[in-house]
């Protein structure tokens, strides 16, 4: 599905990524872990056409390396950025409807009932609060709304950037259950996550990024047992080690 080869990313003259190779297969969850500033967010932004980059990005065999963000989104690559970027002055349901613009357009006829049903089934709390302004939601609810809005865009893959950031442990557990449920419905996920333990637990494959380069990669269960990962990110051995 998603194949990245020799990816480099730049912010002006500053290079953030160095020859990154990553693959996301159909039906999988792939996590990216690493320290702050390692380049994880830059990788997602490169895929989404948001930063200057070189190398090759292929989506289902199509070279999308030089596509802009709109062209990429229209191919079903939905990016949920770090920071829960909801529209505070819109209701929950209005925020969700914004997500349909990707395939409906600004003036197209509304046919989003199926998408709304899917999102409300996945996140019942959003249905309960559908008429509330989004600024009034809790942090966890806003994150669910941000993911729900991406689901309204009919994603063929989700790029999630730090979905658990700033959330309470119980909320994180619930959110990760939803991420697994979305994946089981058929949506592959590429996720940047600071909570390495939980990310590795739900992922099929994992990459560790350090100073802009891939340092470790492999099946998530194997990465979780790597002493370098344990020492740097986990602190204890995973249960299966």
Image (cartoon, grey):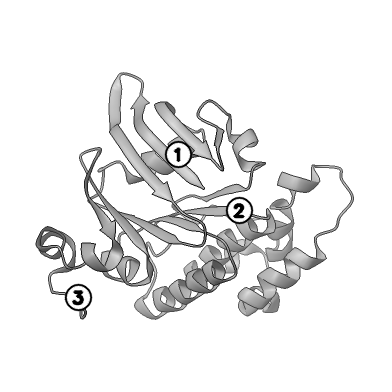
Q: CA distance from mark 2 to mark 1?
A: 17 Å
For marks 2 and 1, give the one nearer the viewer. 2
Mark 3, secondary structure of its residue? loop
Quadrant of the drawing holding the C terminus? bottom left
What is the quadrant of residue 232 in the picture? bottom left
Residue 173: % across, % down: 40, 78
Mark 2, secondary structure of its residue? loop
Q: Nearer the viewer, residue 151 or 7?
A: 7
Question: Quick check: 56 above or below 31?
Answer: above
At 48% from the left edge and 45% from the top edge, which residue is drawn? 2
Residue 170 visible? The answer is yes
User: What residue sits right under mark 1 in the picture?
Assistant: 45
**Total marks drawn?**
3
User: As drawn, is 43 to the left or to the right of 97?
Assistant: left
Residue 201: % across, % down: 32, 72
Contact (CB < 8 A) between labels 3 and 1?
no
Q: Residue furthest right?
A: 109
At 48% from the left edge and 72% from the top edge, which residue is drawn? 180
Q: CA distance from mark 3 to mark 1?
A: 30 Å
Numbered circle sitting on residue 232: none
User: What residue sits right under mark 3 in the picture?
Assistant: 238
User: What residue sits right under mark 2 in the picture?
Assistant: 156
Q: Earlier in the sequence, mark 2 or mark 1?
A: 1
Mark 1, secondary structure of its residue? helix
* Residue count near mark 2 (Cα–Cα under 10 Å), binned few <14, some 14–19, many ≥20: some
For marks 3 and 1, give the one nearer the viewer. 3
Residue 6: % across, % down: 34, 31
What is the quadrant of residue 236 in the picture? bottom left
At 29% from the left edge and 64% from the top edge, which residue is drawn? 220
């Amino acid at each position: 599905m998603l194949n990245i080869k020799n990816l480099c990313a730049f912010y002006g003259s500053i290079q953030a990524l160095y020859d990154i190779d990553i693959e996301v297969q159909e039906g999988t969850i792939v996590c990216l872990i690493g320290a702050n500033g390692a380049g994880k967010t830059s990788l997602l932004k490169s895929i989404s056409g948001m930063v200057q980059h070189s190398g090759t990005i292929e989506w289902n065999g199509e070279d999308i390396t030089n596509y802009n963000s709109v062209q990429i989104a229209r191919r079903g690559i939905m990016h949920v950025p770090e920071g829960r970027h909801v529209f505070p002055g819109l209701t929950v349901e209005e925020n969700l409807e914004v997500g349909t613009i990707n395939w409906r357009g600004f003036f197209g006829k509304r046919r989003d009932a199926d998408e709304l049903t899917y999102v409300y089934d996945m996140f019942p709390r959003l249905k309960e609060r559908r008429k509330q302004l989004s600024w009034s939601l809790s942090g966890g609810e806003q994150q669910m709304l941000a993911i729900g809005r991406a689901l309204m865009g009919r994603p063929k893959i989700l790029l999630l950037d730090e979905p658990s950031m700033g959330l309470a442990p119980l909320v994180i557990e619930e959110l990760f259950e939803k991420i697994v449920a979305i994946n089981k419905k058929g949506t592959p996920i590429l996720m940047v996550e600071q909570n390495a333990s939980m990310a590795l637990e739900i992922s099929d494959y994992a990459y560790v990024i350090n100073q802009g380069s891939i340092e470790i990669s492999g099946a998530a269960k194997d990465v979780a047992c790597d002493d370098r990962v344990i020492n740097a990110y986990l602190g204890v051995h995973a249960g299966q080690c």
